[in-house]
Amino acid sequence: MEKDIEALEPKERLQVLEKLMQYVIPKQQAVSANLDISRLSDEQLNTLVEELTKDIDDGNND
């Protein structure tokens, strides 16, 4: 099989390898998240804001 693949034109070789990869590498699936913030408590909202802003540099280098 290796000799057969090597005998192919580069374009054809890539096509064969691409088709074989689907059996080895898992395909990504779309992921979505729906968040209704109106249903969150104040504590949950504060936690969410803290998590979203924890790595933001506020410009104060004190």
Image (cartoon, rainbow, N blue to C red):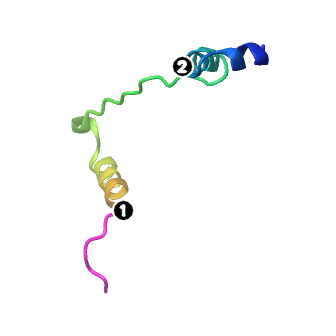
Q: Quadrant of residue 13?
A: top right
By secondary structure, the bulk of the magenta-drawn segment is best described as loop
Report the span colored magenta: 54-62
Residue 4 placement (x, y as % from top left): 74, 13
Q: Are marks 2 and 1 in contact (CB under 8 Å)?
A: no
Q: Residue at x 59, y 14 (%)?
A: 19
Labels 2, 1: front one: 2
Q: Along the line of sight, which residue is nearer the eye, 34 or 32?
A: 32
Q: Which callout, 2 or 1, points at the residue further toward the start of the chain?
A: 2
Q: Residue at x 36, y 62 (%)?
A: 54
Residue extending farthest bottom = 62
Q: Residue at x 25, y 38 (%)?
A: 37
Check disc 1 and give the amino acid type: Lys
Taking 60 as reference, is 58 above or below it? above
Taking 45 as reference, is 17 above or below it? above
Residue at numbered disc 2 = 11
